[in-house]
Amino acid sequence: MGTEPTNQLGQYLRARRALVTPEQSGLPAGSRRRVPGLRREEVALLAGVSADYYLRLERGRDRNPSAQVLQALARVLHLDDVETQYLHDLARPASRARTAARHRRAERVPARLHDLLAAVGVPAFVESRAFDVLASNPLALALSPRLAPGGNRLRSLFLDPAERDFHRDWEAATAEFVGAFRQSIAIPATGLADGDGGDPHGVAHDSRVAELVGELSLASGRFRALWDRHDVRRLRGGTTLVDHPVVGELKLHRDKFPVEGLLLVLYYPDAGGDSAEKLQLLASWAATTTEDAPPGT
């Protein structure tokens, strides 16, 4: 008979219930629990659905749960707004197929973005939804050579030892990147609407993403553990501390702006602060390095 095909909604439900403790749900922990987190029947009880119905959801036998059921599951699994929306999207393959068509357009950097990268006085680059770097300005390269076009930010983060030294809190950075990555590529294969059982990673529709997830899952235990959690985080900016080999510690704000299916990413310091001065020094160093480089390099 073989094993039953996996499905994205079921995988997400299993991953999230494994993270909720009985104590968080007001249930006795007991001493003979064989699974981390909540049992299926406990989730069903707390959500007000039958255990058989919940089992069908996890096994992909019911692909049309109502909004009320999804909201109840989100409450039981302690999902935030972003995770709740992700849960609803997983249960609506038809609408996600339309979104997939929009995202499958060629990832080409418009000429005006190249002009913008050249004009701004802060590290800036353009990335795809798979976190491939498509274009960057000289100051971004001075901040990190791993921001060169053709690189991938996830691959660098997990596989390049220099990234561990670069990020002041590498553990937090990896968790944030993987959650944002899953949100960015959260568009399952259109075949889900045809009842084919789905794709266990949610990436079969995009060979580039599938290749990247497969590579990182094999090469990095840290990535594999984070990927299996199914965390979802909003694509947004923030503040990060990095250790630069030339100018030392930099505190930089990060903002991301969507442009035609791509993301424009800017790193900038507080005006007048120590990091602003260091960034100016970095810009001068980068300009000097470029001027001193042999022709054709």
Image (cartoon, grey):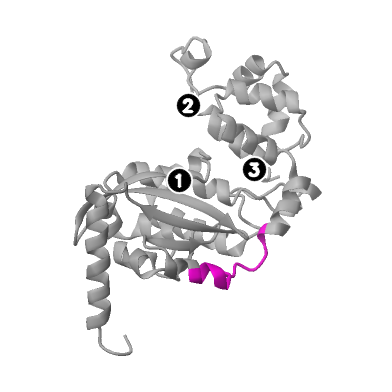
Q: CA distance from mark 2 to mark 1?
A: 33 Å
Kindly identify the amino acid type of the residue bearing the numbered disc 2: Pro
Mark 2 neighbour density, 10 Å: few (under 14) some (14–19) many (20 or more): few
Q: Nearer the viewer, mark 2 or mark 1?
A: 1
In the image, is residue 196 above or below residue 34?
below
Residue 151: x %, y % from top left: 42, 67
Residue 165: x %, y % from top left: 24, 53
What is the span of residues highlighted in magenta in the rendered image? 103-115
User: How many circles with numbers are drawn on the protein?
Assistant: 3
Q: Observer-nearest residue: 44 or 159?
A: 159
Task: Kindly identify which residue carries mark 3.
Answer: 8
Earlier in the chain: of badge 2 and badge 1, it is: 2
Determine the residue positioned at 31% across, 85% down.
Answer: 297
Q: Observer-nearest residue: 38 or 286?
A: 286
Q: CA distance from mark 1 to mark 3?
A: 27 Å
Determine the residue positioned at 46% across, 16% down.
Answer: 32
Q: Quadrant of residue 67?
A: top right
Determine the residue positioned at 58% across, 35% down.
Answer: 82
Task: Kindly identify which residue carries mark 2.
Answer: 36
Kindly identify the amino acid type of the residue bearing the numbered disc 1: Gly
Determine the residue positioned at 50% across, 56% down.
Answer: 213
Kindly identify the amino acid type of the residue bearing the numbered disc 3: Gln
Q: Observer-nearest residue: 34 or 55?
A: 55
Task: Kindly identify which residue carries mark 1.
Answer: 237
Q: Nearer the viewer, mark 1 or mark 3?
A: 1
Q: Nearer the viewer, mark 2 or mark 3?
A: 3
Which secondary structure lies at badge 1? loop
Question: Per the image, is 67 magenta?
Answer: no
Question: Per the image, is 109 magenta?
Answer: yes
Residue 66: x %, y % from top left: 77, 28
